[in-house]
Amino acid sequence: MSLGAAFNNASSGLTVALRAVGATSSNLANALTENYGKREVTIMSRTEGGARVTGTSRLVDQRTQGQIWLVNAQAAGNAQSLRSLEEIDRLVGTFDDPGSLYDISSKFETSLVSLASRPEDTVRQSNANQAADDLAEKIRTIGSGIQNIRSDADREISGVISALNADLEKIAELNGSIAKSHGQNTAALEDARQALIDKVSQIVPVKAVARDYGRIALMTPKGQFLLDQSASAIDLNSRNVVTSDMSVEGETLDLPILNGNAFQIPTSGKLASLLEIRDTAAPEIYSQITALSETLVSRLSGVASDGPLFGFDAPSPDAVALGYSGDVSTIDANAALTALNTGNRRFSALVSDLSTSLSTQVLNAEDRLGSARSSSAALIELKDSTAVDTDSELQKLIRIEKIYAANAKALQVVGNMLDDLIKIG
């Protein structure tokens, strides 16, 4: 081997070692950094001798990462559903909560029992009046609270869509930067892109599709592209206030639009959960509250010597419209108790059914969220098993140091030989 070839081999070895040190040092420094992809230099031999670095690869288990994005959507959607259901459950209250619907309806029935034993007692009359007023107020409060939750969901839908559009635009920009890198190291750009996809996947579930020049496309499980050559635009006409008579079917509430066409709502993700709360879950619970209001009015109307009992009335079939203005001094409390508990179910049992149903929904939502988070944790653990191993990276750093030292020694020897040749000449 000529001295020139030896010099080329050694100098290229030093260059490769320096690049390898940079990648390994980056791996060690970012071993605990979220969304960091392990770096590894790609090396190939040169025809003139020696070696050269052809690039720096970012090593990520794409299959596992794709599964993490889908599970993240489930976890984010379940968490949103749980928060909304817990809020409604707090409005209604549980059996042992002071001031819950069950507690107030029980006190109303107890006041009737007390009044029936001494109907002339003005204190018991006052207590019955107050219990009736409290019950009407509680039902109105629950009804208006549920509508507030729907209004909040509608505003939050608008917010998450704005965030989604912004993140898709940023991913499109990173795609462009990666495609124009002309062979430069794009690992940091890919890390940033993955962090943005993590955010997007919590709003809507996505699948990444590889494109040329390192770009990716994002599509929903239902096959609609959110990002390809450019970012798609999702639009929604939001309402400041959502009332009980507003619905998608009645064309008073809107669904998201994707590039001017109908957006096929995924089954998971925060966006799907908010739409579910606004359009299905909350209205269904509201209809049960309204049914309680109608039952109260229908069962107790006319049970008095002169006029409707207590003055319960609902001008419209709507829980927030339930009113009370009355006087129990002429009421037959025994007849009222009988009327209150006629039908297939006692009124207290209907209230109990509602409370039980809500508690069950909350428990089911907790179970779904726990399951999704467990799956996510297991997938992240699997992904981490192929990520940076600090022990391995330290061993690699020692080997690189030896390679660097060997090539530096070879350069020194070549230099010494050249000096000797010059002296001889």
Image (spheres, rainbow, N blue to C red):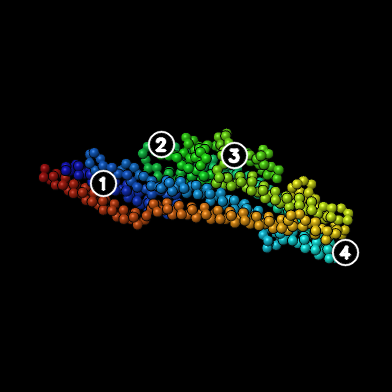
Mark nearer the N terminus (2 vs 1): 1
Residue indicated by mark 1: 13
Mark nearer the N terminus (2 vs 3): 2
The span from disc 2 to disc 4 (Cα, nearest Å) is: 88 Å
Residue indicated by mark 2: 212
Contact between labelled residues 3 and 1, with CB atoms less than 8 Å apart: no
The span from disc 2 to disc 3 (Cα, nearest Å) is: 30 Å
**Residue 354: horizontal and vertical position, in percent?**
68, 55
For residue 124, which quarter of the picture?
bottom right
Amino acid type at circle 1 is Gly
- With 92 as the anchor, is 332 left or right in this view? right
Is 151 or 113 nearer to us in this picture? 113
The local secondary structure at tag 4 comes to loop
Mark nearer the N terminus (1 vs 3): 1
Is any atom of residue 354 visible in this view?
yes
Residue indicated by mark 4: 120
Q: Quadrant of the N terminus?
A: top left
Q: Which residue is situated farthest in the top direction here?
A: 260
The local secondary structure at tag 1 comes to helix
**Residue 425: horizontal and vertical position, in percent?**
11, 43
- With 120 as the anchor, is 357 left or right in this view? left
The span from disc 4 to disc 3 (Cα, nearest Å) is: 61 Å
Contact between labelled residues 1 and 2, with CB atoms less than 8 Å apart: no
- Residue 256: mark: 3
